[in-house]
């Protein structure tokens, strides 16, 4: 048995009406209850006119009377626009990518004042970029990003204010000049770097040569001073040695017999060399042999014609003691040498430390000859006189033995 056969047409119509009422109630409830998410605003129209703006939360609407026109996102949005060709003031086409940071502050204006505010912002950015870049050349465009960003933000913020949009920030993501211009710019930058490198190398070579010349100058001065001191010390040492030998000979009372014996010992050494084919006997040999023979004969010491010897045997003619030594104490000399070596090391270290600093024009003041000063009469002042040669110390006495009575001198007129 079929169910529909037991129902009359009135009951069927009642079920249909009931079903339609249930559907209507469900649809009405669905349209009446609105839950708005956070950071979203909904614009509500009542019978086609703006009614109110719904914030986040639960809201009830009049079904079939109120309707939601649009939902506006209140968060800050980031939109990146495709590259736009822009012509600079020097007729070069550059491609510029822009990024816009904006936020909807008035949902009603964003919905009713403009149809699509994103497209409006994009077109307004392109036209503003062309106005700003058109007054700059390529060099200014590449180096004035902050200025361009500031001008774009000012124009966009003023124009989008009536749309309920606030532009927070505008950034130029990329500025791409033509490929030919990029090659020229790379060559220019390479040439600039080469020029700077050449200048720095020349400055370094110049400072190195100045320091080398200064070091050679100081080394030459030190070598000259060392040679002078060494010559003075050698002369003082030789003088001291001669004086000591002279004193030892006179204190030992070397008589003519000893001198004649030494003379005979030296004579064979003269003929030792095979290159000597012949050698000569000095004229004093006969006198020396006579003194030697007289010594072996037992005769006394020679007495000058004037009388007895003027100096007893074993007494030095220079007195009881040698004159004071003018040589420097070894400890003092060693300390002075160490002090000079330390000063030279510190000077070289400081010169090496300051050699890497930037060039200072005052460094080369001593390398250029200065013009002689003008005298009172308008003429040039003559250069200073050279320094007088250094005199030996006053405490060094010339070692010249005084002639004794036994030595041949001017007193007896004999040689």
Image (spheres, rainbow, N blue to C red):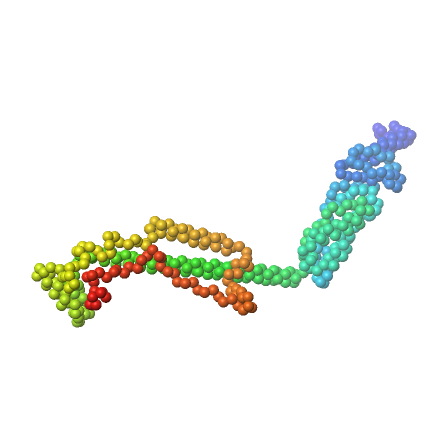
Residue visible at 51% across and 65% down in the picture = 369
Compared with 175, 162 (above or below) is above
- Would residue 242 appear left or right of 158 to someone viewing this image? left
Farthest-out residue, left: 297
Farthest-out residue, right: 10
Count of all numbered marks drawn on residues in the image? 0
Q: Where is the N terminus found, in terms of image quarters?
A: top right
Is any atom of residue 174 visible in this view? yes
Tell me where residue 275 appears, x and y as whole percent: 19, 69
209 or 309: which is nearer to us?
309
Tell me where residue 349 appears, x and y as whole percent: 46, 52
Compared with 370, 251 (above or below) is above
Compared with 71, 267 (above or below) is below
Residue visible at 56% across and 68% down in the picture = 378
Residue visible at 80% across and 33% down in the picture = 58
Residue visible at 48% across and 61% down in the picture = 209
Q: Where is the C terminus found, in terms of image quarters?
A: bottom left
307 or 276: which is nearer to us?
307
Image quadrant of residue 279?
bottom left
Image quadrant of residue 194?
bottom right
23 or 72: which is nearer to us?
72
- Would residue 192 appear left or right of 242 to someone viewing this image? right
- Would residue 196 appear left or right of 109 to someone viewing this image? left
Compared with 362, 68 (above or below) is above
Farthest-out residue, front: 306
Tell me where residue 16 appears, x and y as whole percent: 87, 32
Tell me where residue 199 appears, x and y as whole percent: 55, 61
């Amino acid at each position: 048995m079929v169910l529909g056969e037991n129902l009359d047409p009135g009951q069927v119509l009642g079920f249909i009406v009931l079903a339609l009422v249930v559907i209507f109630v469900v649809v009405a409830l669905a349209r009446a209850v609105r839950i708005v998410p956070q950071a979203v605003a909904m614009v509500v129209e009542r019978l086609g006119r703006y009614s109110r703006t719904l914030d986040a939360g639960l809201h009830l609407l009049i079904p079939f009377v109120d309707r939601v026109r649009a939902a506006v996102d209140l968060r800050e949005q980031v939109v990146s626009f495709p590259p736009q060709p822009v012509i600079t003031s020097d007729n070069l086409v550059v491609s510029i990518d822009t990024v816009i940071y904006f936020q909807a502050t008035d949902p009603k204006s964003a919905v009713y004042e403009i149809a699509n505010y994103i497209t409006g912002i994009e077109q307004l950015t392109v036209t503003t970029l062309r106005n700003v870049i058109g007054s700059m050349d390529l060099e200014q465009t590449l180096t004035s990003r902050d200025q361009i960003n500031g001008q774009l933000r000012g124009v966009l913020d003023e124009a989008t204010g009536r749309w309920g949009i606030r532009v927070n920030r505008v950034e130029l993501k990329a500025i791409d000049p033509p490929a030919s211009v990029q090659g020229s710019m790379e060559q220019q930058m390479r040439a600039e770097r080469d020029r700077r490198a050449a200048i720095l190398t020349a400055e370094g070579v110049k400072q190195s040569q100045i320091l080398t010349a200064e070091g050679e100058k100081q080394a030459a001065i030190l070598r000259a001073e060392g040679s002078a001191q060494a010559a003075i010390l050698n002369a003082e040492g030789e003088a001291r040695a001669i004086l000591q030998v002279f004193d030892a000979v006179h204190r030992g009372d070397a008589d003519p017999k000893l001198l004649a014996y030494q003379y005979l010992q030296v004579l064979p050494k003269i003929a030792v060399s095979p290159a000597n084919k012949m050698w000569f006997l000095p004229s004093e040999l006969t006198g020396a042999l006579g003194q030697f023979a007289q010594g072996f004969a037992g005769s006394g010491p020679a007495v000058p014609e004037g009388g007895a010897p003027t100096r007893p045997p074993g007494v030095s003619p220079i007195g009881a003691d040698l004159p004071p030594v003018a040589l420097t104490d070894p400890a003092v000399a060693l300390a002075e040498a160490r002090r000079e070596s330390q000063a030279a090391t510190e000077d070289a270290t400081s010169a090496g430390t300051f050699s890497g600093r930037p060039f200072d024009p005052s460094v080369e003041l001593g390398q250029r000859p200065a013009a002689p000063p003008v005298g009172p009469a308008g003429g040039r002042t003559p250069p200073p006189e050279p320094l007088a040669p250094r005199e030996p110390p006053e405490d060094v006495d010339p070692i010249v033995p005084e002639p004794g009575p036994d030595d041949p001198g001017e007193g007896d007129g004999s040689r």
